[in-house]
Amino acid sequence: MTDAVQARGLRKNYHGTPAVDGVDLDIADGEIFALLGPNGAGKTTTVEILEGFRKRDGGDVRVLGEDPQRAPRRWRYGIGLVLQNASDMADMTVAETVRHFAGYYPDPRPVEEVLDLVGLTEKAGRKVRTLSGGQRRRVDVAIGVVGRPRLLFLDEPTTGFDPEARRQFWALIRRLSEQDATTILLTTHYLDEAEALAHRVGVIAAGRIVAVDTPAELGGRASAEATVRWTEDGAPRHLRTDRPTESVRELAARFDGEVPGLTVTRPSLEDVYLDLIGNP
């Protein structure tokens, strides 16, 4: 696999204070990559440099094979953006809005195809201002993909969504990834969203990438000690162990069958994330 994004030693200072302090990052073609980090960690600055909207102070960056700081206009056609606070043309219809943005690209997708892709065919004639929050976000995605981008940036795409709308949006992102092999860089504060969508996760803290791995393996999560919990003599009990299967077998033998209240858990993605960024 080739890399849609390559960054080495990426740096950016504000008034002498490093916001991005030597970031190394690789994102493969066709990958969904989630970049996680607390506010002020350098996440937004890193993404803006990759998008070509902010100049770096040091390091080497290649996005779709070009330096975003010096890339020609044609490079921009391969980039799609879905910003956190996207603006829309509220008094235009959904179809008119998508058609307007399609006009900026040399080879856009047909409007009808885009509306079908994002699940807005039945809303094509509705004015954008009449849509629900989730539907308006789908318009943002339609605008982001109408130019056939190879790389799509999604910035906090489901903030404010209810659970049903979030899961519908997740299905759309998976469809984009699987159907078109679109590379997606996702920033989100929802760890369940990163776990549900991302092939790999990167955690940035204090301007540095502190871990990159699959959601299941991040921070040694898969091999971390498990917690076995059960109820005995009317009281909750628990045991931390790196051999949970053996512990469960011993409990089953002791109880001669079903173990009351039995659960086996390993650290959640949230547990690992908080540890990586230095939270207690």
Image (cartoon, rainbow, N blue to C red):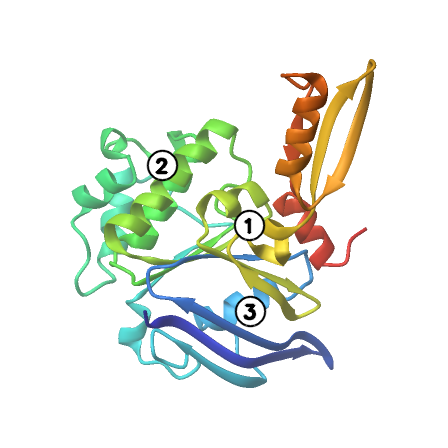
SS at circle 2: helix
Q: For mark 2, does the 10 Å Cα neighbourhood hold few (<14), some (14 to 19), or many (20 or more) residues?
A: many
Question: Who's the residue at 36% across and 36% down the image?
Answer: 128
Question: Is 196 situated above or below 27?
Answer: above
Q: Report which residue position mark 1 lands on.
A: 188
C-alpha distance separating marks 1 and 2: 25 Å
Q: Quadrant of the N terminus?
A: bottom left
- Where is residue 19? Give x, y as percent: 67, 72
What whole-number distance in Å separates the C-alpha atoms at marks 1 and 3? 14 Å
Relative placement, left or right, of 27 versus 40 is left
Is residue 139 at all visible to an observer of this figure?
no
Local crowd size for mark 1, using a 10 Å CA cut-off: few (<14), some (14–19), many (≥20): many
Give the x, y percent position of residue 78: 29, 67
Q: Where residue 12 is drawn, which disc sits there?
A: none
Q: Which mark is residue 128?
A: 2
Q: Residue at x 24, y 32 (%)?
A: 125
Nearer to us in this view, 38 or 254: 254
